[in-house]
Amino acid sequence: MSGKPDMRVSLGGLELKNPVIAASGTFGYGREYSPFFDPARLGGLVVKGISLKPREGNPPPRIAETAGGMLNAIGLANLGVEAFIAEKLPWLARQDTAVVVNLYAESVDEFGELAGRLAGLDGVAALELNVSCPNVKAGGMAFGCDPGPVGQVTQAAVEAAGDTPVWVKLTPNVADPVPVALAAAQAGARAVCLINTLLGMAIDARTRKPVLANVFGGLSGPAIKPVGLRMVWQVRGTLAAQHPGVDLVGMGGIASGVDAAEYMLAGATAVQVGTASFSRPDACLMIAQELGQFCAEESVARVSDLTGGLNT
Amino acid sequence: MTTIVKAKVVGNQAVRPEVFLLTLETPEIAAAARPGQFVMLKVAPGPDPLLARPFSVHGTDGGKLLILYQVRGKGTRLLAEAEPGLELTLWGPQGRGFDLGGAKRPILVAGGMGMAPLAFAAKVLEERAIPSLFLNGGANQESIRGLEDRLEAMLVAGIERGSVERLRSFFAAKTKAAETSFSGAPRIILGTSTEDGSFGHKGLVTDLLEESLSASQDLQPDLVLSCGPLPMLKAVARICAKQKVASQVSLEAPMACGVGACQGCVQPAAGGGYLRVCQEGPVLDAAQVDWERV
Ligand SMILES: Cc1cc2nc3c(=O)[nH]c(=O)nc-3n(C[C@H](O)[C@H](O)[C@H](O)COP(=O)(O)OP(=O)(O)OC[C@H]3O[C@@H](n4cnc5c(N)ncnc54)[C@H](O)[C@@H]3O)c2cc1C
Ligand SMILES: Cc1cc2nc3c(=O)[nH]c(=O)nc-3n(C[C@H](O)[C@H](O)[C@H](O)COP(=O)(O)O)c2cc1C
């Protein structure tokens, strides 16, 4: 093959330089990684989940390493939307990459309010709704477990966001992700992202105590890649048939360019990289480079040709 | 830019059972490192273990970085097997180190592996010709011996061992001596405690700290630096608050990113909320920490 592969992708209303995006909660507010590489080399970055009011998060210990993965119970610690806009967004707006703001809220109205506050601001390319949050008005059950609430939340955000694309990030802690993905698409989501962390637990047998103060935590890292691939593949068929304009963003355990290619073959238009940044701060960059190499080796002219290319 | 380096192992020897001195060839990090800062070290490539491990900078030797570590679990057990010539990935130095700025009469309090960063601080104080008191505590003679050898090895003029009475009068004596000149003589006096009494004072290192702080009023120690197990740090913070002596503690917490992004490694902050050990710390003014919630 002659020349370099074309790494650009169109995703959920955005044009990205390449399909590798840093995942929410693992890339801070972006600047934390700027000593290691220029974020302009990424397709995009998703900031830590932002809520209306600042959140302290859970008591420590908040993290525990597990076989091929890790558990986290950070508790959505963040500085709140006003401080985010004042202190973090100006720097982000100067970076030549797509900045996506991940939203955390505990009611449909709060999601709408947050989306309205952030949409259209300089530097905000898209909004990503974290529907793994507890729906406080419905007894704390996560929004993301039911198509109904996911549709309501998405609709509220889409209405408030105007021209700013809204992506919906699904939880893997459901029996069937398809109805939930369809509900998001129906309500106007431009992209569906999956997966968030899997609910898990670690125990210290010597002390007979849970390792995390919160007892439960979210499992991420290489250990969850098979689950992520399965869910992307599972959702892809129905979504492509019923909502061909809605893209998929795959994530969960991506640690190499080949891992990223696997997600794209399963149906993802782009990928997000989370925990890998903890093993190496420049992991996102390396994965983007490796994906380019993979395309060159496999004579793939455009990286977007990988999407949905799985032979079954 | 902070670079992520691949550094060659040039040494990895036991200094006592389960504690090793790792020497890495990494001029960039060695040149930048200050006492109290740490590096993130990936002990093996790939997903097992997945995360890099934080280690304090124990010292530098030209372009070499020294790490003093204890075998705790999977990662450190694997690290203990690293042979010279092997390349390891690491980044840093990270975090806020000790602020040695204005100290004239500092006391350093180490418990167990707290020796790792404090020996580096002692070395810098020696270079600045500031006499200091080093209090070291451990379970027994066997557990402290190799660690105190490391302290001695780091210092040009070595250490002088001191009784409790000597610790009390140290700063007064040293100040007089400094006025005359004691070039070549140790500027650092070491007091040791063991829980079983097999060496030095029988009891806790914080007993020695209380003794040292009860000395003459006009030549009170003006800064206490400490690193060690949490209960020890709590006691140090309490004693220093009571005696109104400034105190800096080096804290630990299980860590993931090491760069301030994930908010995994927090400890409770005075006045509410949390501090990130990797960013606001690992060295914090004891007054920044909410010791009730630690
Ligand atoms: C800023 C900082 C500096 C450090 N400097 C040194 C040093 O100079 N020398 C040294 O020997 N150790 C140091 N540590 C502790 C060291 O990072 C841990 O011992 C190491 O990560 C354990 O890894 P492991 O894979 O062997 O154990 P794991 O299998 O991960 O865990 C074994 C046990 O250690 C505990 N543990 C794991 N990570 C930490 C941690 N970061 N802090 C406290 N407990 C932990 C676990 O809860 C578990 O009980 C430092 C820690 C921090 C946060
Ligand atoms: C420490 C940590 C914090 C996270 N915080 C968020 C968050 O605030 N919002 C969110 O939607 N996902 C969050 N996630 C989930 C990740 O974005 C990602 O979906 C998940 O970790 C799976 O990808 P990975 O295996 O590449 O890490 C977090 C993950 C980790 C490890």
Image (tube, rainbow, N blue to C red):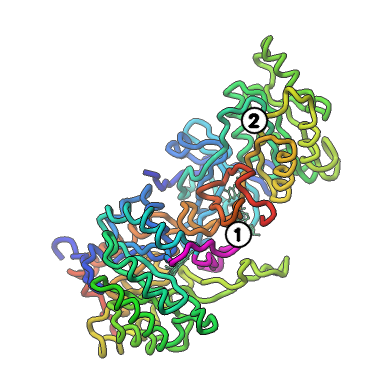
Q: Foreground residue, B79 or B216?
A: B216
Write down the residue under mark 1. Answer: B74
Query: In which quadrant will I find the C terminus of chain B?
Result: bottom right
Is residue B227 something one can see in this rendering?
yes
Q: Position of residue A172 (x, y in %)?
A: 45, 80
> Around disc 1, counting alpha carbons within 10 Å, would you say few (fewer than 14), some (14 to 19), or many (20 or more)?
few
User: Mark 2 vs mark 1: same chain?
Assistant: yes
Amino acid carrying label 2: it is Ala
Q: Residue furthest left?
A: A2
Chain for numbered disc 1: B
Quarter of the image that includes the N terminus of chain B: top left
Q: Quadrant of residue A139?
A: bottom right
Task: Name the residue at 43% across, 47% down.
Answer: B6
Residue at the limit of the structure toward the top, as seen here: B180
Q: The residue tagged with tag 2: helix, strand or loop?
A: helix
Ligand 1 within 8 Å, label 1 CB? yes
| Chain to which the residue tagged by mark 2 belongs | B
Three-letter amino acid code at the position of disc 1: Lys
**In the image, is residue B271 above or below residue A166?**
above
Magenta-highlighted residues: A51-76
Mark 2 or mark 1, earlier in chain? 1
Q: Seen in the image, is A99 located left or right of residue B282?
A: left
Horizontal relation, residue A277 to residue B212: left or right: left
Above or below, B241 against A291 in this view is above
- Along the line of sight, the residue nearer the viewer: A48 or B113: A48
Which numbered circle lies on residue A61? none
* Residue that label 2 marks: B153
